[in-house]
Structures are given as C-alpha cells and as structure tokens.
Image: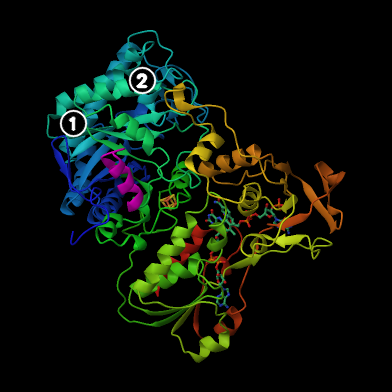
Amino acid sequence: MTGPTNYPILLSPIDVGATTLRNRVIMGSIHTGLEDRAWNTGRLAAYFAERARGGVALIITGGYAPNRTGWLLPLGAKLTNRIEARRHRRITEAVHREGGKIALQILHAGRYSYQPLSVSASSIKAPINPFRPRRLTSRGVRWQIRNFVRCARLAQSAGYDGVEIMGGEGYFLNQFLAERTNRRRDEWGGSPENRRRIAVEISRKIREAVGENFLISFRLSMADLVDGGQTWDEITTLAQELERVGVDMINTDIGWHESRVPTIVTSVPRAAFADITGKLDKHLDIPVAASNRINMPDVAENILARGDAQLISMARPMLADPFWVRKAEADAAALINTCIACNQACLDHAFAHKTVSCLVNPRAGREVELELLPTRRAKKVAVIGGGPAGLSAALESARRGHTVSLFEARAALGGQFGIARRIPGKEEFAETIRYFTNALAEADVTVRLGHRVTAAELLAAEFDEVVLATGVVPRIPSIPGIDHPSVLSYAELVEEGKPVGDRVAVIGAGGIGVDISEYLTTDSSPTLDLKEWKQEWGVTELEAAPGALTTPVPAPSPREVYLLQRKKGRIGAGLAKTTGWVHRASLAAKGVHQLTEVNYERIDDDGLHITFGEDHERPRTLAVDTIVVCAGQESVRDLVDELTASGTITHVIGGADVAAELDAKRAIEQGTRLAAKI
Ligand code: FAD
Ligand code: NAP
Ligand code: SF4
C-alpha cells in the first residue's frame, strides 16, 4: 500500500486469535456450486486465488457439510475424509501463494437440507423445504458434534488457516438455538442454556482438537427475524460463551432463509444491520465482523470508525469485483465494480442449482473459462449503444488492447439501466453506470454521447469491427385508443418524468410492470431511510421481541394503482426466487389492485376498458387518469442490414440481438464474451 488512504482502519492489520490478517476485509461465505463436484476444484482454486490477489485478508469458503445428513443438496459439498481433504490442498495453496488466508465453513443444513436424510433438533418441517427432518436422539446429537470436529481437523490437515462454524441463517445450529425449531426437553432443548449447548460444545471441542494456531470463526445470527427466534439476551450470552471456549471471532448475520423480511436485496438500505453488530461488540473482547449490504469502502470504514465492528465481511461484493481491496488501497473507489445486490447471477443461480456468477462481473466463477487476454492484433472497434451490453463490450475490448469508440444516442451512459436506477429501491443500479463511465475513461475508450450514429457514418470511419448494442424500445401494443393522451410508456414516465394522475393502470406485469407499480406507489422521495425501512418491514429493537419482529407499517401509496396481465396465474410468478417475494409483498403492502386474464378492449376519455376473468366475460372500466404501458420490448436493429450488406464485420448483442427475456445479466455477459473473442 502506498501513500495516505481514505480508509485507514479498513486497511490496517488486525490480530484474530493467533492469526494476523493484513486488513479488515473478509470475503464472506457464498456457496458457488463449484464445491459440490471434485472436478471443479481447479476452478474453485482459481476463483479464490483471484480474490486473494485482489487483497482480501481472509476468505471463507462456501459451506461444507460435516456429514451426509448436513448436505445442502443430495451429493452436495462435504468434508468427511482424507481423500476429500487432500483435494482441498490445491485451493489452500493457491490462496497462500497470493498472500491470502482461507478458512473452511462447516455448514450443516439441518432442516434446510433438501433431501430425505435431513435431521434437526425437532421434527418440524421448514416452510421452504418439502422434506421433514428426523429428530436427532441425544446420541445422534453427540455424533453430529464429533462430525463437526472431524471436519475441522480435516480442514486443518488440508492447509486451511481456520474454520467458520455456521450458526446462523436458520441452519442446523440455529435450529437448536431457537425455540421456534427446538421443542426438545432433554439436555439439548428447553432452557436457553440447553439450546445453546450444541453450539458451545462444538466450538469447545474444535478448539481442543485444532490447538491455538488455528482460527475459529462462529457465524452468529444477530436477529432471527422469525417468530420464535432467539432473544437478545440469548444471543449475547451465547456469544460470550463462545468466546470463553475459544472462538476467535464472531461473524454476524441476519435473518433466516424462511424469514419474511428482506435482508440482502437491493432495496435494503446499505449497512442496515451494522448497528446491531455494534450492540453485540460491546459485550465481547474478541473481534466482531459486520455483514449484509456493505458494498463500498466508505460504508465499511464508517462502520469500523463508529466502533460497530472490527472486521467487515462481504461475499457478493467480492464476486462483483475481486480487486475491491486493491482499489480501496489505491483510493480508487470510483473504479470499484459495485455489487448492486440484485442476486440475479449469485443467489438466484444457487437456488436454481446453477454455478454462481455475477451480473456485473460475468467472469466470477468462470476465471478459467472466460479469460480476457491482451490481443495480438489491435483493431479499430465501434460499439453502438451505451447500455449494459455495449458498456461491457467496449470496456473489455479496450482492456484487451483494441482502439474503441462508443456511440450513445442519449445524453448519458447506461441505456435502460438509466431508467432502472430511478425505481425506488434500485438506486444501486447507478453504481454500475458510474463504474463503467470511469472504467471506460481509464481504458481510453472514446465516448460520444448524445449522438445517434448512422450506418453511413460508421462505414465512412472504416472500423475493423462494429458491435451493435442498440438495445430495445418499449413495445406499444395495438389496443384501440393506444394513442390517447393518457397513455405513457414506462420510459416516458420515468426517464422523461411526464405527469401522472391519482389513478393509474399499468399494462403488463413483468419485471418492469412490477417495478413501475412500486415507482407509482412510493412517495416522491424514493430512498427509504433505515428507520422507515424497518417500519415498512416490521423490524423492531432486538430487546423488544424475540426474533426482532413487530407489525409492519408501510407508508401509504400516493395513488391508486391497477396492475394487469393477460395471462392466468399469480402476478409476479415469473420473478426471481430470491427477490420476487419481496416485490410481491411490497405490492400487497401498497394495496396495488392485481387483475389477471385481462383483455384490453379500448382506451378513451373514460379510462381503460377491459374484460377479465376466465373467458373474458367480466367487462369493467377502470376510470384511470393515466395508463402506463409495460408490455415488453422490441429490438432496435435499424443499422444491422446496411452494415452487414457492406461486408463490415458486425456483431449484434444484448437487446438488439434478442429482446425476449432480456436482462442485464445476459446483456453484460454477451458483451464480455464477445470482447474476449474480438
Ligand atoms: P439498452 O439498455 O436498451 O441500451 C441500448 C442503448 O443503445 C440505449 O442507450 C440507446 O440510446 C442506444 N442506441 C440505440 N441506437 C443507437 C444509435 N443508432 N446510436 C447510438 N446509440 C444508440 N435488468 C436486470 O437484469 N435486472 C433488473 O432488475 C432490471 N430492472 C429493470 C428495471 C427497469 C425499469 C427497466 C426499464 C429495465 C430493467 N432491466 C433490468 C432490464 C435491463 O436494463 C436491460 O435488459 C438492459 O439494459 C439491456 O441492455 P442493452 O445494452 O441490450 O440495451
Ligand atoms: P416481461 O417480463 O417479458 O413482461 C412483459 C409483460 O407484458 C408481460 O406481463 C406480458 O404478459 C405483457 N405483454 C407482452 N406483450 C403484450 C402485448 N402485446 N399487450 C399487452 N401486454 C403484453 O418484460 P419486461 O417487464 O418488459 O422486462 C424486461 C426484462 O427486464 C425482463 O426480461 C426482466 O428479466 C428484466 N427485468 C428484471 C427485473 C428484476 O427485478 N430482476 C426487473 C425489471 C426488469 P401478459 O402477456 O400476460 O400480459
Ligand atoms: Fe451482487 Fe448481483 Fe453480482 Fe450477485 S449478481 S454479486 S447481487 S451484483
């Protein structure tokens, strides 16, 4: 590190037990899916090594089960024998070569295990899993403890610097800790002391087995955010007990997977739970790590400066930018590719049993396969369109050594992301535009804004290759009266700020229709502060209720909104697994009227005339002032024919290529993959 820094605490070393960390940044555990298959060990080693090279002090692996009952999935990752441990050497050596440290997370899924062998404190089925767990006998509990210890020993033999015991997120140990899932009346249940016995015993026995020079972290839930969750007194007493039996640090986390309060999606305010970590910190001498929705160095430094934690744990931000720490060291936060908390390529992939990657960094998890090597022949490349597809193609082509010109018709970069970032709760999307804008300048890309380029201009400039990333425009459906002055496209509403009435109908309930409904039902100041957010979702003070839950009090909508779709079935059913339920809950909280199986008959001065229900037999007039059209999009391909006819090497990517089911994940990945080949 050279020169002064804006982040003096974040970048200073710290002793955690017998281990010295080079700074305060921990890459938190995220299960990539690569852990599950032996043949992916090389990919996993490359993925972690890149993060270690990027300066992170301590990496925590995805979760490994201590036995088959603890599997996340059938045949999922486990560490139970020496053959498996030997394979891990490749990972630990790769990280150590880059000057990093790495701990293995021991994760027993308990009743979240998606398989019939699952076990738990009591036989109570999780609402998010069809498999009912078997209640462990007291002997069974002791066997589980021995398996945790064996797993830690094997991790030590594989060259890990430590282990993290997963005790939060509603997994196995959390199931013992909370009354919600522990109805036992033996030594492992009933009183708080009995409920925490398994966590304390595991920690104590692991310390005895591994000696002093091996880091033990415990992932502890700060607030379960479920009915029947732990009380604050139980949580602090547990943390103190863990400290007493030899745990070196507490890595905090919030909420169970079944909790109905969002904890990591983009609409959760940054560092929303750091103050809770701060409350725990006061009870302990060992260091505490803050986590959840911390994605930029200034946010992290503030938490440390306030004394709320001594370490910062970030998982997704390390997927988004492996060189996050190096950029913080160079005071170049403006060049950090920020995690926008969309979950689209990380957690949504994990839940769909696909390898985890990142929307803003498609190389994450594909470090071996998607290499961006310097080019041997620099070409003159034109990229048309400054949306996500064009931005990624232009940036990565320039980084490889090509001479790149980017043309954008709008006055600013970002394309449709420029609209998305204005949706309440999606403000983080502006960070992607900020990153690309600065990185393009750093990579010497010539950017021409406010210039709708023509094929003739491109041909005259004699580019070697042209990338058409001209994106999409809103589809205007052919409904009688669609040109009525009350009708707006979503772009006209949000981008141009056209006025809107008190009663609004939204045509189309895909991702954009849902976003627009949230935009319309949120008062003019879109960003919720933390206090309002907690009221909205019913999160209270920890001391006030077990699980920290209270009755939600959402702010009333400033207008009445109807959200309509033609197809049958629940509105928002096609939204992603980890975020869809949050959107559906928000729509319900704001009283959005939702109608399905709608036929749009006509639009006139009386409003929107529809028939709906099965066979479209029920006519109704929605007496609305404004109708916002969110009926999908169409590709902009006006330059394709002329360029290809001229013989120019022309590539078409993003929405210009295929508009259906287009999202920024596909757009950015396509741009990056093309850049790797040009
Ligand atoms: P675009 O973003 O459409 O960009 C194309 C650009 O090309 C435009 O800026 C246009 O001005 C420019 N252009 C066109 N012709 C020319 C020309 N001749 N000369 C110069 N410039 C030209 N996606 C997600 O993945 N997750 C989300 O949560 C999400 N939320 C969204 C919310 C909203 C409200 C909206 C509107 C979109 C959202 N999207 C989301 C979709 C995402 O923004 C798009 O999939 C993505 O922007 C498509 O990228 P693109 O580069 O192909 O096209
Ligand atoms: P979409 O999800 O395909 O939804 C389009 C909607 O319009 C559908 O509800 C469709 O349903 C309706 N529709 C289609 N043609 C119509 C017609 N001719 N007349 C009337 N209605 C019509 O697309 P989108 O909402 O435009 O979103 C675009 C992309 O952005 C999506 O692929 C999505 O992945 C991405 N996005 C993602 C998020 C996110 O949170 N992850 C948020 C916003 C956008 P019916 O035919 O049933 O009416
Ligand atoms: Fe963050 Fe989205 Fe990337 Fe996941 S996919 S790491 S949430 S930016």
Q: Quadrant of the C terminus?
A: bottom left
Q: How is the image coloured?
A: rainbow
Quarter placement of the N terminus: bottom left
Viewer-closest of 599 and 482: 482
Which is nearer the N-term, disc 1 or disc 2?
A: 1
Residue 260 at what x, y percent from top left? 53, 33
Instruction: Please provide percent x and percent y for residue 416.
Output: 56, 63
Q: Is residue 445 visible?
A: yes
**Viewer-nearest residue: 469 or 222:** 222
Element under disc 1: helix
**How many marks can you see?**
2
From this viewpoint, is residue 673 visible? no
Q: Residue furthest top?
A: 185
Ligand 1, seen in the image, is in the quarter at bottom right
Name the amino acid, label 2: Asp
Left or right, residue 578 beside residue 279? right
Q: Is residue 293 left or right of residue 323?
A: right
Measured as percent of width and height from the top left, residue 588 is found at 65, 38
Q: Give the numbered dot on residue 153.
A: 1
The amino acid type found where label 1 is placed reads: Arg
Indicate whether residue 290 is drawn in magenta. Answer: no
Using the image as rendered, state which of residue 301 and residue 510 is in the foreground: 301
Q: Is residue 675 above or below residue 134?
A: below
Magenta portion: prevailing SS class: helix
Residue assigned mark 2: 233
> Which residue is at a point 85% across and 57% down the rendered structure image?
602
The magenta region covers 297-311
Tell me what residue is drawn at x 37 percent, y 32 percent. 71
Residue under the image location 36 percent in, 14 percent down: 192
As rendered, which of 114 and 124 lies closer to the eye?
124
Contact check, label 1 and label 2, Cβ < 8 Å: no
